[in-house]
Image (spheres, rainbow, N blue to C red):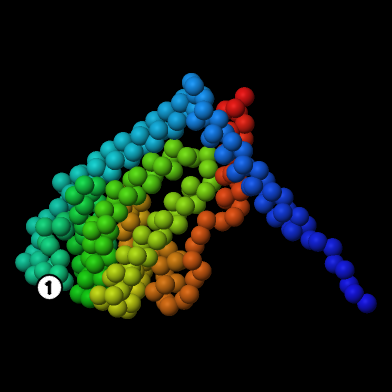
């Protein structure tokens, strides 16, 4: 006897969301054609101007906060680099002019600056880590510096602010930040090995006062994440991608927005 199972409620829900996404895509294409053929797209112009304004305001505000924070940090806490440490930096294959040393008991390692990015290290970090671990931390931050990651993150924040109504953009921002950290970790691990970078992360986390606020404001620093720790432990975590739910929710929002603009 053949058992006939009824389709689950989840299958119906998935099918409904898929149909909704297809309808949304068709509607957006139709709206885009209507927009292009419209003689005076007033609503569209107002919408685009509003979104661009939000992005620019966020860009300027975030850049001002970052510059103000880093300038104060460097101005009040920067100290001359000891000759021994400068020699180590040269041995690591880095330029001492790209590194700023500040007086602070907290272990700080971050990349800051948009057009001329530099690396900021604290005396507390040098006292906490071994020479190999310091090299791993420097190489991690230097990778951010070479790729202008502070500037890239600033642009990402502006785009996220402008498209705040789309869940897919917020999810993409998180994935993008994690990818930046993993790429920098991979670069450091190739030069020093996993043990050095993992040891640096472990000691910073064990210290109990990792500079998460500075890392969030200025750039991606030696802050911990589950993906980074899993990668250093050799665990194979699935590649993070934008979820289907986020895509469908965003498509629904765009669909509703298109209907409003077409009225």
Is residue 257 visible to us here?
no
- Residue 7 versus residue 199 in the image, above or below: above
Q: Please give the name of the residue rendered at 11% of the width and 61% of the height, measured from the top-left corner.
A: 96
Q: Nearer the viewer, residue 108 or 22?
A: 22
Q: Which image quarter is the C terminus in?
A: top right
Left or right, 79 with respect to 108, comes to: left
Q: Nearer the viewer, residue 75 or 263?
A: 263
- Residue 221 versus residue 75 in the image, above or below: below
Badge 1 marks a residue whose secondary structure is helix
Q: Nearer the viewer, residue 65 or 78?
A: 65
Q: Which image quarter is the N terminus in?
A: bottom right
Q: Residue furthest front?
A: 37
Q: Quadrant of residue 87?
A: bottom left
Residue 44, position as x, y percentages in the image? 49, 27
Q: Quadrant of residue 255?
A: top right
Residue 210, position as x, y percentages in the image? 34, 60
Residue 16, position as x, y percentages in the image? 72, 50
Is residue 44 visible to us here?
yes
Q: Please give the name of the residue rendered at 20% of the width and 44% of the height, measured from the top-left corner.
A: 71
Classify mark 1: residues with Cα within 10 Å, few (<14), some (14-19) or many (20+).
few
Residue 172, position as x, y percentages in the image? 47, 52
Q: Please give the name of the residue rendered at 34% of the width and 65% of the height, measured from the top-left corner.
A: 183
Residue corresponding to mark 1: 91
Q: Please give the name of the residue rendered at 24% of the width and 42% of the height, measured from the top-left corner.
A: 67
Q: Residue furthest left?
A: 83
Q: Nearer the viewer, residue 206 or 131?
A: 131
């Amino acid at each position: 006897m053949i058992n006939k199972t009824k389709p689950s409620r989840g299958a119906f829900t998935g099918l409904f969301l898929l149909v909704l996404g297809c309808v949304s895509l068709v509607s957006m294409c139709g709206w885009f054609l209507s927009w292009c053929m419209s003689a005076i797209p007033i609503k569209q112009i107002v919408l685009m101007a509003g979104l661009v304004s939000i992005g620019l305001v966020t860009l300027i505000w975030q850049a001002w906060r970052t510059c103000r924070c880093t300038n104060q940090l460097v101005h009040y806490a920067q100290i001359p680099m000891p000759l021994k440490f400068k020699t180590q930096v040269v041995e690591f294959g880095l330029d001492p002019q790209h590194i700023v040393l500040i007086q602070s008991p907290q272990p700080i390692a971050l990349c800051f600056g948009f057009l001329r990015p530099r690396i900021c290290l604290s005396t507390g970090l040098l006292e906490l880590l071994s020479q190999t671990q310091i090299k791993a931390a420097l190489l991690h931050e230097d990778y951010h510096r070479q790729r202008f990651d502070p500037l890239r993150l600033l642009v990402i924040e502006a785009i996220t602010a402008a498209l705040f109504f789309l869940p897919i953009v917020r999810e993409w921002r998180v994935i993008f930040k994690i990818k930046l950290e993993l790429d920098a970790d991979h670069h450091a691990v190739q030069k020093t090995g996993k043990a050095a970078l993992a040891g640096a992360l472990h000691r910073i986390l064990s210290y109990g006062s990792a500079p998460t606020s500075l890392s969030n404001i200025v750039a991606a620093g030696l802050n911990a994440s589950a993906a980074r720790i899993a990668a250093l432990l050799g665990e194979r975590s699935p590649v993070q991608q934008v979820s289907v739910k986020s895509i469908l929710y965003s498509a629904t929002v765009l669909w509703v927005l298109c209907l409003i603009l077409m009225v």
